[in-house]
Amino acid sequence: MKNHPARLLFLLIALLAACTPDAVPTPPPTNDTTNEAQPETAAAAVPPPTTTPEAAPIATATAVPEAAEALPAAPGSPLMLVDQVGGAAMTVAVSGEMAFVGEGVRVTAVSLTDPAHPQVVGRSAPLGGVVRLLELYRDAAYVVAETGWIDVLDVSNPADMQPSARLALVGVAQSMAIADNFLYVTAVTGRDETTLSTWDIGEMATAVTSTSLSTSPAASLTLPTDAQTRLTSTGQLLFVSQSGRIDLFDITQPGQPQAVGALEDFEGFAVQPALPLADGRLLYANEFFHMFTIENPAAAGRMGYADYSNFQVTDSTARQGGFMTMRAETAVLIDTGTIAAPAGPSFIWTIDTTPIGKFPERVAELPFTANDVAFIDALAVAAHERGLSLIDLTDTAAPVLLGELAWGTAVSPSEPLAGFTTGSAVPSEVFTFDLSDPLARELFLSLQRYNIGSAVLGDVQVVADPAAGYPGAGLVQLDVTNPTAPVETAVIDPKINTLWQNGEWLFGTGSGLHTFALNTAGVLESVAVCEDCYDGGISAILGVAPGVLHLLGQNGVYIVTAADPTSLAPANFIPADFWITDGTVLPGHNTAYYLGTPCSAGALTCAGSTLWTLATDNALAPEIVNEQAVSGDARQLLLFGDMLWVVTTDGRLHPYDLTNPLAPQPLDQAMPLPLAMSVVQTAVSADTLYIFHPEMGLLAYQLARR
């Protein structure tokens, strides 16, 4: 069985016409000194990851020149990013009726004027990685998207956000908070070492395009931990949460935080932001709900807590707390799922804080796992892997889901939904895009379906959905007569997990090798099955020649005759001492390439993988003519730009020259993606390579140079 993550989304491609171009800045021509012709369409490139500065100051600021929006291509990279859309929303911040949310590698500004119909106002240019932290102050957004840097964006005009400065930061940023004119950042800088840095941003925020910015933090101090931290501030106190401990700092002296107390050795391991109240209490929810008194920080202590068993629902796995707001004397908690992966859906809880000791009450289940939540009065703005959701908390006992943005596109319910869902699975989605122009794209609709494979037969879309059956896959039929509004019509087979299409025929493996076709009623049905055509798990099916299928799997290559698709028969077998994970056929050259790895799906390290080149003049008895070692854990192959590309799980695309198709030559131009990943989805359309990553979204690449 092909090893895909349960939530991996597969994209449906619909060739439609009219679309709205995205506001992606157009850069100058790439700095290519060769005479090679460049792609006609070019757009902003994601800047290459920048090495963490070695300079002594924890943070420095550098002014960005006026043309900074024209992000350069990575030096030596054979690919350039021409567009990006979607991705997980890891963080959100609000100012007035405007929310700024991370949308993959961009910051997206969303108007909340009508919470039932949130509207995208503008998007930033792509940053150097997934947007993970974001704080607002006056007309500036402080964004962590790339290790070693904090990007400063001028958001005075949300429709045209512009980069204004970069703060160089040693270490890996964990959390940010802003109080008065000061920015506080925690970053892991070594073993058992986290640095809390503080610097004055008042001048930067009031003159965000200024070229004379402070280049050093006002203060920095070291905390003895390299674990996760979260920051919260009241303006007078700064709270640094970590596992089982909250440190209190007096920040009344500008830029000089002083440790004044600590809450420690309390139950729970999850790290969440604390909620300080005006009456001298502090609320905190990890696996337990805690209430502390901080009126005298030096004598801070716990007033009480609620037992974790009341945070459990159907099993013994504790919830891991999350984000809170107060409505009168009721604390409203939106948790971040269970403490064990997968986290599952978030729940909304209410806790009566007078007196402490009353148990939390679950009032709603959300159709997503919250990554971050911002509150505006009774409105909760929740960021999650699918986008943004707006929840009305006016009636704390009956929250109402008002509207949503799925990948930056409004997906409002036909009417407000109260009570949300009672299911336990977090729904994934199928997205439909118009790809007629890689720079003019529009998301039309989201459909709640997982997806690990897809084929189109006329007006029928067939999806291999790991949530539709057991063990871990199923074949689902959709009606795509209107590609912007696909409709699920049937679950055809509960076990199919690998698909390959040849004209009107569809082949799938799961419980034997099946041939599927549409019957006269337009319903897909199995018309043939071969139960002895393979043994063990199958990763991919390839049509290597007319009437010949190669099934790639954990034991090797199973060769099947399919000249008559309704009569399948085993023909040959090529054994392998590694799992063959993927393959591709070079058209017109009687050549196929197969990729194998000895590594398990969850392996943290891998000694290497193997690339086979096969001569397929006789597809029933192919010959292995070349065997090459590939460094790392290689899982995928694709053909693009007259080159063979090997995708490894460290997020690198390795190109091979095919001047001699039977002897691929590796090029020293491996392209790292902005974020390492385990598995991606890829597709090629004309001169554009599309890569899908669940956090980064859909990325469109074109060749920068050969």
Image (cartoon, rainbow, N blue to C red):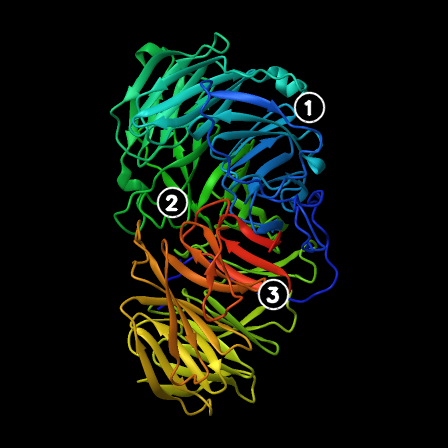
Residue 144 sits above or below residue 458 on the image: above
Where does residue 403 sit, x and y in percent of width and height? 59, 47
- Distance Cα–Cα, label 2 vs label 3: 32 Å
Considering every residue shown, the one lying at the far right of the view is 18
**First in sequence: mark 3 vs mark 1:** 3
The answer to whether one can see residue 50 in this image is: yes
Task: Mark 3: give few (<14), some (14-19) or many (20+) Cα within 10 Å.
Answer: some
Q: Are marks 3 and 1 in contact (CB under 8 Å)?
A: no
The amino acid on which the numbered mark 3 sits, given as a three-letter code, is Ile
- Whole-number angstrom distance, CA of label 3 to CA of label 1: 41 Å
| Label placed on residue 13 | 3
- Helix, strand or loop at mark 3: strand
Is 598 left or right of 26, judged from the image as shown? left
Q: Secondary structure at mark 2?
A: loop
Residue 68 locus on image (x, y percent): 67, 33
Q: Label 2 vs label 1: CA separation? A: 40 Å
Q: Position of residue 452 (x, y in %)?
A: 45, 65
Residue 354 visible in the picture: no
Instruction: Tell me the crowding category of disc 2: few under 14, some 14 to 19, or many 20 or more residues within 10 angstroms, Cα based.
Output: many
From the image, tell me which residue sits under label 2: 337
Disc 1 target residue: 209
